């Protein structure tokens, strides 16, 4: 028997006495903390031995990467920069068919401006968007969906949450697109991330977000920027840059 964080769980034991236990995610409290674990073993004649220890738990996802700039070359994007941080940053391309592929990129830190530059091996073509993920030492991941300009058309954003949910999207950045247009509903919002049911949307006065059924619930300041708060359904919450036009 294994007592983890105050709850008992039955381990699987083989003929040689080796044991294993998979603790269901629902039994792990969110946050960063030390959880007590007590392992109790009983042999065939009733002798009992116990082992007590603690496990370091960290389920807190890092903040989504902040995109500082991008570099255009011809008909596509050749690189981006993000704020420097200690997380592992990966760059992914969202293709026209909604699939996501990793971008081959070389990175270099520039401490003087607190940015990391990512130079792409091949350019990301116009009409594609990016997913930038940050993964901490505990394996927690959060992602930022970056909408890029397509110089020939307005930037219509179609979110394939079935795929994007693997990247725990908690921020959508419309700042680098001309007239970005995003439509989102409760089901899509809830599918975008397994970390939370919240989504932050950044952008400007030329961007529009349509969220049918949302209810405005006040405003707040995040990192010096003002956001309007909207509830969407029973569980979803949106934080939308107050410069963005919202249609509900």
Image (cartoon, helix red, strand yellow):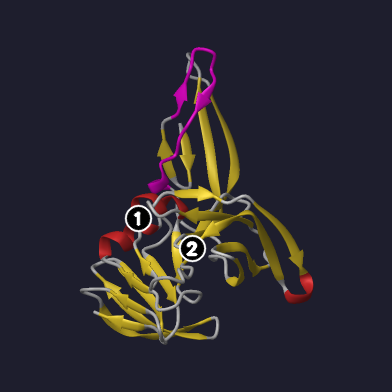
The label number, if any, that marks residue 92 in the structure image: none
Which segment is the magenta one? 11-27
Residue position for label 1: 161
The residue sitting at 46% across, 74% down in the picture is 177
Looking at this view, name the residue that lies furthest to the right. 112
242 over 134 or under it: above or below: below
Question: Residue 51 at x, y = what percent?
Answer: 59, 34
The residue sitting at 50% across, 28% down in the picture is 20
Report if residue 115 is visible in the image. Answer: yes
Question: Residue 115 at x, y = what percent?
Answer: 70, 70
120 over 151 or under it: above or below: above
Q: CA distance from mark 1 to mark 2?
A: 21 Å
Q: Of tags 1 and 2, which is closer to the observer? A: 2
Question: Residue 133 at x, y = what percent?
Answer: 54, 57
Residue 128 sits inside the magenta stretch: no
Label located before the other in sequence (1 or 2)? 2
Is 223 or 184 nearer to us in this picture? 184
Position of the C terminus, as image quadrant, is: bottom left
Q: Is residue 133 left or right of residue 195?
A: right
The label number, if any, that marks residue 126 in the structure image: 2
Report if residue 134 is visible in the image. Answer: no
């Amino acid at each position: 028997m294994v007592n983890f964080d105050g709850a008992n769980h039955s381990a699987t034991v083989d003929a040689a006495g080796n044991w294993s236990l998979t603790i269901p995610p629902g039994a792990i409290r969110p946050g960063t903390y030390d959880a007590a674990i007590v392992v109790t073993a009983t042999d065939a004649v009733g002798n009992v031995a116990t082992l007590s220890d603690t496990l370091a738990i960290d389920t807190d996802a890092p903040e989504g990467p902040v995109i500082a700039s991008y570099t255009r070359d011809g008909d596509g994007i050749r690189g981006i920069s993000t704020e420097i941080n200690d997380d592992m940053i990966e760059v992914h391309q969202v293709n026209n068919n909604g699939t996501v592929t990793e971008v081959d990129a070389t990175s270099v830190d520039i401490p003087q401006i607190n940015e990391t530059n990512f130079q792409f091996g091949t350019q990301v073509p116009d009409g594609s968007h990016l997913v930038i993920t940050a993964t901490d030492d505990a394996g927690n991941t959060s992602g930022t969906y970056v909408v890029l300009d397509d110089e020939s058309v307005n930037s219509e954003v179609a979110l394939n949450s079935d795929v994007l949910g693997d990247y725990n999207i908690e921020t959508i950045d419309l700042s680098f697109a001309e007239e970005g247009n995003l439509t989102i509903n409760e089901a899509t919002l809830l599918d975008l991330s397994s970390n939370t049911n919240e989504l932050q949307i950044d952008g400007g006065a030329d961007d529009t977000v349509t969220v049918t059924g949302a209810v405005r619930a006040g405003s707040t300041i995040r990192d010096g920027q003002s956001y309007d708060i909207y509830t969407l359904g029973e569980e979803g919450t949106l934080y939308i840059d107050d410069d963005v036009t919202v249609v509900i």
